[in-house]
Image (cartoon, grey):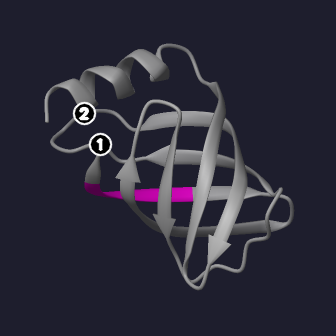
């Protein structure tokens, strides 16, 4: 689903910010100038629309990279974050 949600990320000696451009329950496409490599493990904090609390993904793995965009697979969510994400996607 095409979106524009800010995201903060950190992991494997890197931290940065960007924006999700595409998002599903299992992963998404992030646009960012931060130099990431395929296979990098990231901790993500997605700022949902409105006044919702951020969605925390405790483990996401970079699966592909093209210029300033890369794809991540969500592996582990914090608490009820997966349900939060599913609810957010269903409301669009």
Q: Main secondary structure of the magenta part?
A: strand
Part of the protein shown in magenta: 3-8
Query: Quick check: 76 above or below 14?
Result: above
Report x, y in % for residue 8: 52, 58
**Which residue is pictured at 26% across the width and 54% down the height?**
3
**Which residue is pictured at 63% across the width and 42% down the height?**
73
* CB under 8 Å between discs 2 and 1: yes
Q: Which mark is residue 52?
A: 2
Query: Quick check: 15 above or below 53?
Result: below
- In the image, residue 68 lies in the stretch drawn in magenta: no
Instruction: Work out whether residue 54 or residue 5 is closer to the camera in this orientation and state it.
Output: 5
Judge from the rendering whether residue 60 lies leftward or rightward of residue 39; answer left or right. left
| Residue 62 placement: quadrant | bottom right
Report x, y in % for residue 66: 61, 78
Residue that label 1 marks: 48
Report x, y in % for residue 79: 55, 15
**Which residue is pictured at 47% across the width and 23% down the height?**
81
């Amino acid at each position: 689903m095409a979106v524009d949600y800010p995201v903060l990320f950190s992991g494997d000696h890197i931290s940065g910010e960007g924006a999700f451009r595409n998002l599903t329950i299992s992963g998404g496409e992030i646009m960012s100038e931060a130099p990431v490599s395929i296979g990098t493990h990231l901790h993500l904090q997605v700022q949902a629309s409105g006044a919702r609390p951020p969605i925390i993904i405790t483990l996401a793995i970079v699966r592909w990279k093209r210029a300033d965009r890369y794809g991540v697979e969500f592996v582990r969510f914090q608490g009820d974050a997966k349900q939060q994400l599913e609810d957010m996607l269903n409301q669009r």
